[in-house]
Image (cartoon, rainbow, N blue to C red):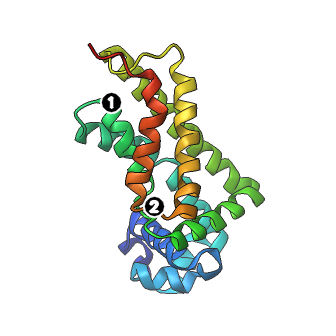
Amino acid sequence: MTGRPRSVSDETIFRAVAETIGDSGPTGLTLAAVARRAGLTAPALAQRFGSKRGLLLAFAEGESGNAARIFGEARAASPGPVEAIHLALASLTSAITTREALAHSLAFLQLDLADPDLRAHAQAQSRAVRAELTALVEEAVDLGDLTVDDPATVAETLYVVYSGALITWAVESAGPLPAWLSLHVDRALAPHRPAQP
């Protein structure tokens, strides 16, 4: 089995972790379950990451570094920064299609809060998303799409709206999550839209 763990990319393994969390939550996240999805064996996965916790830490580190990629892709696919904000935030929730998937994600958040090492990665991801949002708000201001005195504060508000919309969507079950999220992001941005002639 020498070299076999590297025959499957980290990206594939982390996708398998995310899918397992979405389907089963942290309690169903075992090396065997992830290995099956990734096309590996549990011993190969253990050899690569050392333990389930080692796998979780590597996954969390990968997630914390994804913000730049997700926002970059949203910029490239959008006609302007406001549209990129919508697309990027929707992309961050692409794996959440049911209330159960969100519940499993929130259960994983409990692990983040209880484990200092996992929490550090969660904080890094949070800060990276807010930094990317700030940059998009600044771009929108430069283009005249938004009127904002403090882009960082508006970005913080958008991040809070994004986080809260996940919870209210799960409670209300009001259609697809991207539409629910877009509605509330639009409401948060409405006071900053320039007056139309």
The kind of residue tagged 2 is Ala
Task: State the residue position of label 2.
Answer: 174
Q: Quadrant of the N terminus?
A: bottom left
**Which of the numbered marks, if any, corresponds to residue 81?**
1
Foreground label between 2 and 1: 2
Front-most of 189 and 54?
189
Residue 124 lies in what quarter of the image? Answer: top right
Is residue 77 depicted above or below 117 in this figure? above
Q: Residues within 10 Å of mark 1 (few under 14, many from 20)?
A: many
Q: Position of residue 169 (x, y in %)?
A: 52, 58
Front-most of 9 and 171?
171
Whichever of labels 2 and 1 marks the residue nearer the N terminus, that label is: 1
Tell me what residue is drawn at x 49 percent, y 65 percent. Answer: 173
Q: Quadrant of the C terminus?
A: top left
Is residue 43 depicted above or below 53 in this figure? below
Can residue 1 be seen by looking at this rendering? no
Is residue 185 depicted above or below 52 in this figure? above
Can residue 163 be seen by looking at this rendering? yes
Front-most of 37 and 152?
152
